[in-house]
Amino acid sequence: MNRNIFLYLISGLFCFVLLSFYSPTYKLAKLKYSGGGDWYANRSALPNLIKFCNQNLNTNFDDEDAIVEVGSADLFNYPFVYLTGHGNVSFSDQEAQNLATYLKGGGFLHIDDNYGLDQFIRPQMKKVFPELDFIELPASHPIYNQKFKFPSGLPKIHEHDGKRPQGFALILKGRVVCYYTFETDLGNGWEDFGTYPSDSEETRLKALKMGANLVQYALTQ
């Protein structure tokens, strides 16, 4: 074989392997729902969490988050889906079934109360899993003991009603399929620094570390 052709082929193969290695493996997605609630809240949250995970967990997520509807077949393309907002949430029967199938098949849902979500999301998740109840996870749970350690459990990021932060889970056959953060507002902590004047860099870092734990746990449990 001509030496120049050989070198050209080797160079091409090297470039292909390199591009394959660095091409994003997954996307994380924000869940779009009906009912009038602001599902689109915390616009910079997921992109910042993605960047943090890629830098600290050696994940290979696409830099941009996706938007996926509850009832869409595209839901199954994402290993981790994030739901937030302040207002009403409504799942149709088809959407509830689709979300249940996604979660039973290995998907993971993080629900983050952005203040005012609790009264709406609980009955909707009952439509998804009528047989399951949210259970508060103890500080000893693996979700708080991934790369970053939270010996006291879920950190407090934003003040809402002066209540302690709580992390609840829906557990299906021993696997956490949905994790619900209440009275902490992790997503606000993931947003661009300065979005909320009262935030400190220390608090924002705690939020990002807890978010990275969720991603790591979701991908490895």
Image (cartoon, grey):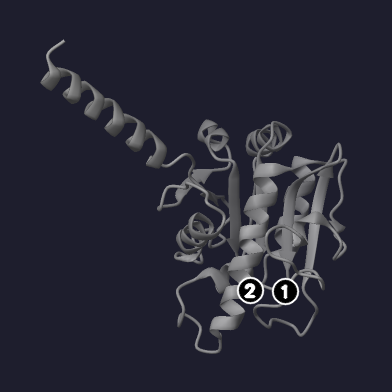
Residue type, numbered disc 2: Lys
In front here: 66 or 88?
Answer: 66
The relative height of residue 221 versus residue 3 in the rendered view (above or below) is below
Residue 186 placement (x, y as % from top left) = 63, 69
Q: Residue at x 55, y 37 (%)?
A: 75
In the image, taking residue 36 as reference, residue 182 lies left or right, namely: right
Task: Look at the numbered disc 1 and give the secondary structure of its residue.
Answer: loop
In the image, taking residue 7 as reference, residue 71 lies left or right, namely: right
Residue at image mark 2 = 206
Q: Residue at x 45, y 74 (%)?
A: 192
Residue 70, quarter of picture: top right
The relative height of residue 196 versus residue 207 in the rendered view (above or below) is below
Asked if residue 4 shows in the view, the reply is yes
Crowd class of label 1 (few under 14; some 14 to 19; many from 20; radius 10 Å): many
Q: Residue at x 59, y 41 (%)?
A: 79
Task: Look at the numbered disc 2 and give the secondary structure of its residue.
Answer: helix
Image quarter (top left, top right, bottom left or bottom right) of the N terminus: top left
Residue 163 placement (x, y as % from top left) = 79, 80
Residue 220 placement (x, y as % from top left) = 69, 43
Crowd class of label 2 (few under 14; some 14 to 19; many from 20; radius 10 Å): many
Asked if residue 88 shows in the view, the reply is no
**Decide: marks 1, 2 in contact (CB < 8 A)?**
yes
Residue type, numbered disc 1: Pro
Residue at image mark 1 = 155
In front here: 167 or 216?
Answer: 216
